[in-house]
Image (cartoon, grey):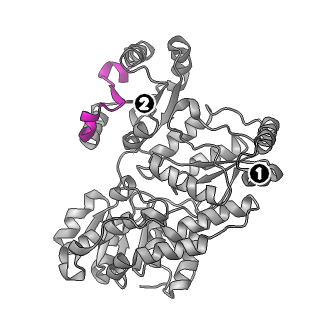
Amino acid sequence: MRTSETTTFECETGNYHTFCPISCVAWLHQKIEDSFFLVIGTKTCGYFLQNALGVMILAEPRYAMAELEEGDISAQLNDQKELERLCLQIKRDRNPSVIVWIGTCTTEIIKMDLEGIAPKLESQLEIPIVVARANGSDYAFTQGEDTVLAAIIHRCPEYDYDTADITKKKTENAGINESTCTRSKSNNHASVPFGSLPSIVASQLNSELRRQSIHVSGWLPSQRYAELPALGEGVRVCGVNPFLSRTATTLMRRRRCQLIGAPFPIGPDGTRAWIEKICSVFDVKPQGLEKRETDIWKSLRDYIGVVTGKSIFLMGDNLLEVSIARFLIRCGMIVYEIGIPYMDKRYQAAESLLLQNTCKKMKVPMPRIVEKPDNYSQVQRMHELGPNLAITGMAHANPLEARGIDTKWSVEFTFAQIHGSTNARDVLELVTRPLRRNDDSLLDWKNLSRQIVEI
């Protein structure tokens, strides 16, 4: 197969073989703790949610399904009255701080005016109602989060540049975190990472930045609706996931924020590059990052010994493929191909550059990146190449296993804690599990310590 030293993009115009974007409710309703998500669609959407998220029923999830009947689709019923009835019940039973309406494909087809109905009910119920259109026109199921965050951005308070300067001066005079205030005072900029991460992972990244005397003024989304970060001119934002290009565009164009174009904090290499880029924007010299990254790599030697020299093929499903491939190349794996449903080359420019530099450092050819891959052609290429592992969507896992190709579901990387240096073990655990399953002689895992080394 042809390879090159520079990034090669190809497009095969295949179908999008991914989940429906309404699946974003699965992780967003847990992240925004005082929210309630109402998905508006047909029984098919309800069946999908019931099967995909049914395991959460014992946890009393804060989401529901508003199923459209024939009368709704034929415009014989009053949409506003039906939604009002449901939202009143939600307010009575759960009393959330915000209700998020998730519009589906059907609401697009029948031109349901959710944006027009929402303000009327919002004033009546005295609860904010955010409308997000997470339908099948998205490239990947993870982009449902992108749609929701882009809608929430408009509800964030306005950042007051002058007030922030006064607050920093008062903080500095009080002697609180003086080094941070002194540096921030010269720039007078707030820092807001965006992307839904588990609270413990967000805290880890906050700590990483705090070590560099950079204060995070808030996250998008926040754990509570009332704690949404202030946005506006003077706020610098940085994404943690590659599927948030719509959110990044909205932050720049609608709220006049400055986007920090950084690689994504996946793996020790990506986390270091993410922090270094943020430090450079705030005119802060990074301290101790090289040693910290070296220590993390040392703690991963047991896993790296398993994956070094093994080959992998990424079919394309969740838009995390480039970041995962870059990290695995740094671990010593051979990546034959990176399939991805869609790639925003501007938003992922820094990640692409880090991928090129990683390939040069490891002295391996650049894998080609195939957008909107044709799965039939990919299977043919896999038969020719014979990779040790394929990362694929659930629809293709069993057929590939039947043909002798070991697989790992890409959706598992979406729900696992893979961000930050200390979570690199989780990524390698997912990758090595099918390899260990078929070759127990690789390593005596019973004697392997399962504790993450505290650096």
Question: Quadrant location of residue 324?
Answer: bottom left
The answer to whether residue 175 is above or below residue 338 is: above
**Element type at mark 2:** helix
Q: How many marks?
A: 2
Earlier-in-chain disc, 2 versus 1? 2
User: Which quarter of the rendered picture does the N terminus lie within?
Assistant: bottom left
Which disc, if any, is residue 107?
Answer: 2
Q: Is residue 301 left or right of residue 8?
A: left
**Element type at mark 1:** helix
Question: Quadrant location of residue 346?
Answer: bottom right
Question: Quadrant location of residue 54?
Answer: top left
The answer to whether residue 435 is above or below residue 250 is: below
Q: Nearer the viewer, residue 309 or 297?
A: 297
Residue 97, horizontal then vertical, whole percent: 49, 24
| Res. 101 in view | yes
**What is the span of residues highlighted in magenta in the rendered image?**
54-74
Which disc, if any, is residue 414?
Answer: none
Q: Is residue 89 left or right of residue 56?
A: right
Which residue in the protein does label 1 denote?
184
Which residue is at a point 35% across and 76% down the rendered structure image? 303
The answer to whether residue 105 is above or below residue 410 is: above
In front of the other: label 2 or label 1?
A: 1
Q: Amino acid at mark 2?
A: Thr
| Res. 405 in view | no
Q: Residues within 10 Å of mark 2 (few under 14, many from 20)?
A: many
Which residue is at a point 57% across and 40% down the rendered structure image? 150
Is residue 66 rendered magenta in the image?
yes
Q: Amino acid at mark 1?
A: Ser
Residue 252, horizontal then vertical, whole percent: 69, 47
Is residue 75 rendered magenta in the image?
no
